[in-house]
Image (cartoon, rainbow, N blue to C red):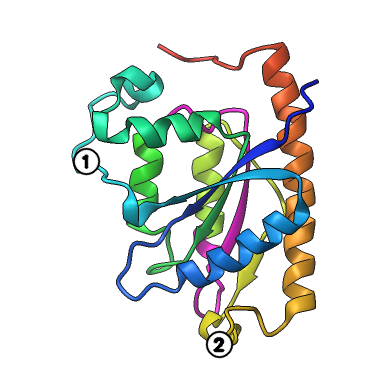
Amino acid sequence: MSEQRLKLAVIVASVREGRFGPVVADWFLGRARHHDGFELDVIDLADVPLPHTLPADLRHLSLLENRPPELAAVGERLAAADAFVIVTPEYNRGVPAALKHFLDWHYAPWRAKAVGFVSYGAISGGLRAVEQLRLVFGELRAVTVRDSVSFPECWNRFGPDGLPLDRPGSEGAAKVMLDDLAWWATALRTAREATPYAPDLP
């Protein structure tokens, strides 16, 4: 079993003008650094130039060399990650379009890796987007951890310092999710090292 630290890619899903996502993401990154089990990489979709047109066969994107040049760097970062945390709002009871488009452009890097969620929004706290994402990541052969972190009415949940008003509750939820994510990421990395997971690569 490898003793190196787990590589965790934190994906900021919202690209909306005036978005609240960076506040939530910055707080979560602080908790992930405090956890000390991960090497962090932040991928902000507002900085990722996604082409509008997808190829006819998405499995064609399984190989890095088949991706457009503008996505080469982010594709390599996803491939290097052992686990992912998606920081996402909920738009119109669903997943932000930019996030779904990003997932569709990257077909293979999620396979046999662990995924956690930090969501925020209005009354549902983004949980309806998370439930949809669990279905999508199941199709992508990823393992989503049970526990997540959620902020309903998020604009009322953070102080001017960018920290949650309910720090014990929020930090406790983040720790539970990160502990679970670390366990699954370690187990899955060990399994991938023993037997590469590629059941339907072209």
- Viewed as shown, does residue 92 lie left or right of 139? left
- Viewed as shown, does residue 124 lie left or right of 52? right
Relative to 111, say whether 65 is above or below: above
Q: Secondary structure at mark 1?
A: loop
Q: Indicate the quadrant where residue 154 lies.
A: bottom right
Q: Residues within 10 Å of mark 1 (few under 14, many from 20)?
A: few
What amino acid type is highlighted by mark number 1? Pro
The numbered disc on residue 122 is none
Residue at left offset 36%, top offset 44%: 102
Residue at left offset 79%, top offset 39%: 183
Marked residue nearer the N-terminal end (2 or 1) = 1
What amino acid type is highlighted by mark number 2? Pro
**Residue range (magenta):** 107-129
Q: Is residue 124 magenta?
A: yes
Q: Is residue 2 at all visible to an observer of this figure?
A: yes
Q: Is residue 106 at all visible to an observer of this figure?
A: no
Residue at left offset 51%, top offset 72%: 23
Q: Indicate the quadrant where residue 171 lies.
A: bottom right
The residue indicated by pointer 1 is 51
The residue indicated by pointer 2 is 160
Of the 4 image quadrants, the one containing the C terminus is: top left
Nearest to the observer: residue 123 or residue 10: 10
Q: Secondary structure at mark 2?
A: loop
Of the 4 image quadrants, the one containing the N terminus is: top right
